[in-house]
Amino acid sequence: MRIQRCDNGLGEDDFNALSALVDAVQAGEPYYDSPGVVSASTWLAGACEDSSSVFVARDSGKIVGYLLAQPFESYRKFYSSPVAYGVHPTSCLYLSELGVAERARGKGIGASLVNTLLAEAKETQCSILVRTLHHVHGTQRLNPAIEFYERLAFRLVMSGDGPLIESGPALRNKPRVFLRWTP
């Protein structure tokens, strides 16, 4: 398995493979039934262009994982101010997409992708913010992604006595929590 930075974009075959992988990841846990979710092929090209960091994980030449991160300031879908998240907008990346093919999970690929981003963030003294579902869709079981990020030294962004939670129609009424990593 190797991690590849995609500064110069992806070829058509790789883009199609990545789109299919994103769709497959978003059809599984913790998302499950996500009516209204638009196919990755319609938004992924723009997301890659907006992202300052695009990485893919390859196993035997095939894309089995991905990570997209962009400057905090360029992502316009936050409900709160940078202060609420505990970040400085000019020195923060928003980790917008992370996924690993189901057949490749449990092999450290997601952690390798995130650790590649963390290494770059350490060099530039940049913090990282990630938003993820609070619970597995349709249950009260905490999203396992929270524990995954905590193992990589991310901490829940708190508000009062609990985690900062955002919800609403734009998030399809699926509450999200934030985790922050600082160098």
Image (tube, helix red, strand yellow):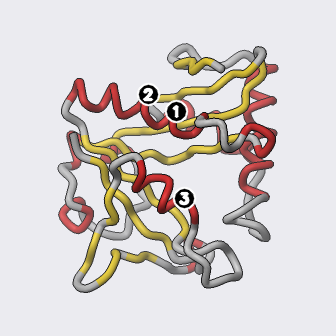
Question: Under tag 2, what secondary structure?
Answer: helix
**The residue under label 3 is which amino acid type?**
Ala
Task: Tell which circle, 1 or 3, labels the residue nearer the N-terminal end.
Answer: 1
Location of residue 117 by image quarter: top left
From the top left corner, tell me how far across and down residue 7 is, in percent.
50, 17
Give me the disc on residue 113. 1
Q: Quadrant of the N terminus?
A: top right
Graded by Cα atoms within 10 Å as few (under 14), some (14 to 19) or many (20 or more), the crowding at tag 2 reads some
Residue found at x 25% / y 85%: 161
In this view of the protein, can residue 147 be seen by the observer?
yes
Alpha-carbon distance for marks 1 and 2? 5 Å
> In the image, 100: left or right of 183?
right
Alpha-carbon distance for marks 2 and 3? 18 Å
Give me the disc on residue 116. 2
Determine contact: label 1, label 2, CB under 8 Å.
yes
From the top left corner, tell me how far across and down residue 171 is, in percent.
56, 71
Determine contact: label 2, label 3, CB under 8 Å.
no
Task: Tell which circle, 2 or 3, labels the residue nearer the N-terminal end.
Answer: 2
Alpha-carbon distance for marks 1 and 3? 14 Å
Graded by Cα atoms within 10 Å as few (under 14), some (14 to 19) or many (20 or more), the crowding at tag 3 reads some
**The residue under label 1 is which amino acid type?**
Leu
Question: Under tag 1, what secondary structure?
Answer: helix
Residue found at x 73% / y 50%: 25
From the top left corner, tell me how far across and down residue 180 is, in percent.
31, 54
Q: Quadrant of the C terminus?
A: top left
From the top left corner, tell me how far across and down residue 126 is, in percent.
24, 37
| In this view, 154 is above or below 58 | below
**Residue corresponding to mark 3:** 145
In this view of the protein, can residue 41 be seen by the observer?
no
Frontmost residue, 153 versus 26: 153
